[in-house]
Image: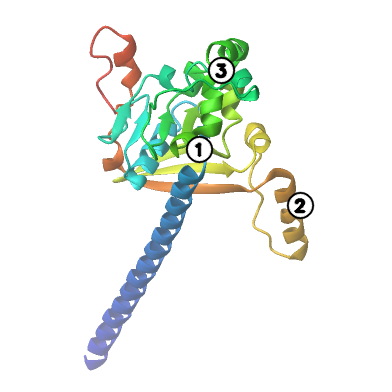
Amino acid sequence: MIWVLIGFIFLVFIGLVIKLILIVRSKLIKKKENKYYKEQNRWLVEQFRRCNVAVFGKKGTGKDLLFAHVIYLRKECHYANIPYNELTEVIPLNIIGVGSNNYKNVLENNIKKIERTFKNCTDIYLSDAGIFFPSQYNETLDKLYAGIPIFMALSRQLYQLNVHFNSQELNRVWNKIREQADCYIRVLQSRFVGPFVYIDTISYQQYNSAEKGILPPLKPRNKKERRELEEFTARNGEVVYRTFRMHKREIKFDTYYFSKVFFDDEGVISND
């Protein structure tokens, strides 16, 4: 009888040890994951503070979710063509520019003075830029809105701000705008898991690499592969898989906003 009791106690002890190991392991994995997502958030915020960022991806992949996430992280007032949260000031796109000035005015040093339109250090986010500035009308846009590319090129000097845009396809956007970006993020998909949304992306340093859809290289395992990675980076710039985690409470924008803009009723009222 005593041996049965000892055996039972031993099994309970082993069970507790295994449970403790699993708990510790789970905490370590969670800690590692949290560290990764914090690092990715820091990278994301830094890119949007540093330069004009172009976000692109197929319909429904989560381009505006990524905008909403970085806007939440930055916690700063901003301009946009759709209301992302309570800090958004919605603007008409035709106010972006440098008045009646064009490249000829700049080249001939004949610049006409203009009134300030934007606040300093207040970035602009353009949703669905491919609809408003479609590349098939490059020449028409060049003539009608010549000041917009100048504004984007000089935005940091004029207002200390950046202009970010998203589109389904990178090459669908007016070439004078997409050429002003210095960081490109391709959104692959968004996964809703519990209270979180995971946004899978690929980041690019170079436009050509982003347009071609080049995939990131594998992690090098030896000296030869490290050399190949260096050659790859020299040709294509840095190309990296990145996943961002956002909480669902960050989603405060209407994913069907444009239905209210175009329709003479309440539009689509569900975010499901």
Rendered image: mark on residue 146: 3
Where residue 202 sits: x, y (%)? 56, 42
Where residue 199 sits: x, y (%)? 44, 42
Query: Quick one: SS at disc 2?
Result: helix
Q: Residue at x 68, y 60 (%)?
A: 220
Query: Quick one: SS at disc 1?
Result: helix
Splitting the image into 4 quarters, where does residue 66 fall? top left
Where residue 230 sits: x, y (%)? 73, 55
Which one is in front, 187 or 235?
A: 235
Residue under numbered circle 2: 231
**Numbered marks: total:** 3
Q: Which quadrant, please, contains the N terminus?
A: bottom left
Q: Residue at x 59, y 15 (%)?
A: 142
Task: Kindly report the distance in space between the C-alpha atoms of the residues bearing marks 1 and 3.
Answer: 18 Å
Task: Kindly report the distance in space between the C-alpha atoms of the residues bearing marks 3 and 2.
Answer: 38 Å
Q: Which residue is drawn at 73% across and 65% down?
A: 222
The vertical placement of 96 against 204, above or below, is above
Q: Which of marks 2 and 1 is in front?
A: 1
Q: Which of marks 3 and 2 is in front?
A: 3
First in sequence, mark 3 or 2: give its number: 3
Please say if the residues under marks 1 and 3 sit with CB atoms less than 8 Å apart: no
Residue placed farthest to the bottom in the image? 2
Crowd around label 3: few <14 · some 14–19 · many ≥20 (10 Å) = many
The vertical placement of 34 against 210, above or below, is below
Rendered image: mark on residue 157: 1
Crowd around label 1: few <14 · some 14–19 · many ≥20 (10 Å) = few
First in sequence, mark 2 or 1: give its number: 1
Give the residue type at disc 2. Answer: Glu
Q: Residue at x 38, y 65 (%)?
A: 31
